[in-house]
Amino acid sequence: MDFPIYFSLEQARAVLPEVKIRVERVIRLNREIAILKSVKIDADEQTIQTELALMELNKKYFKKMHLFYKEVADLTRIGIVLKDVNEGLVDFFSKLDDRDILLCWKYGEKDINFWHEVDAGFAARKSIKLLENYKNRTKF
């Protein structure tokens, strides 16, 4: 598989429903992992119950980690760049003329409404309408 995978705005919008589901899972799993990491079991006293509790905690933790990385890998295979697992921020590589740009979507947004240059970040997002207007002008 070649990377990056380039999306037109229409192609990115077509895969967005699947991306939304997967990003929601990544966010949820990331929170669950943080909770599991915060659990402290007092292991000063080595008992069977303590050992079993530690094993059960580790089993849950590693299962969540496995599911988390599976979702991240699946997003990567689609061609998505996951920028922030806490916020659910993703980018889709695209082209503007012959240069790379990124179509930008954040969990909770209904559609892909922003884009930015590859060397810029979230703060430099521009309205997708600017991109659509530019592409319409260049067709003449």
Image (cartoon, rainbow, N blue to C red):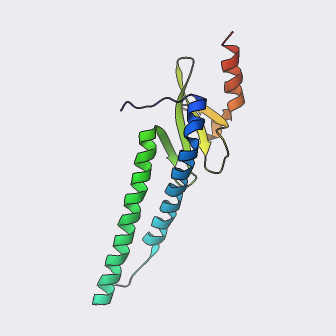
Q: Quarter-wise, where is residue 104 in the image? A: top right
Q: Is residue 44 visible?
A: no
| Quarter of the figure that contains the N terminus | top left
Q: Is residue 60 visible?
A: yes
The residue at the point 60 percent across, 30 percent down is: 9
The location of residue 111, given as percent across then percent down, is 66, 41
In the image, 108 versus 37, the foreground residue is 108
In the image, 45 versus 90, the foreground residue is 90
Up-down relation of residue 75 to residue 50 (above or below):
above
Q: Is residue 45 left or right of residue 77?
A: left
| Quarter of the figure that contains the C terminus | top right
Q: Quarter-wise, where is residue 97 in the image? A: top right
The location of residue 79, given as percent across then percent down, is 46, 37
Up-down relation of residue 71 to residue 37 (above or below):
above
Q: Quarter-wise, where is residue 123 in the image? A: top right
The residue at the point 37 percent across, 65 percent down is: 63
The residue at the point 58 percent across, 52 percent down is: 87
Up-down relation of residue 79 to residue 52 (above or below):
above
Q: Is residue 139 left or right of residue 42?
A: right
The location of residue 130, given as percent across then percent down, is 71, 26
The location of residue 83, given as percent across then percent down, is 51, 45
Q: Residue furthest top?
A: 140
Up-down relation of residue 122 to residue 32 (above or below):
above
Q: Is residue 85 left or right of residue 123?
A: left
The residue at the point 49 percent across, 40 percent down is: 80
State the count of labels: 0
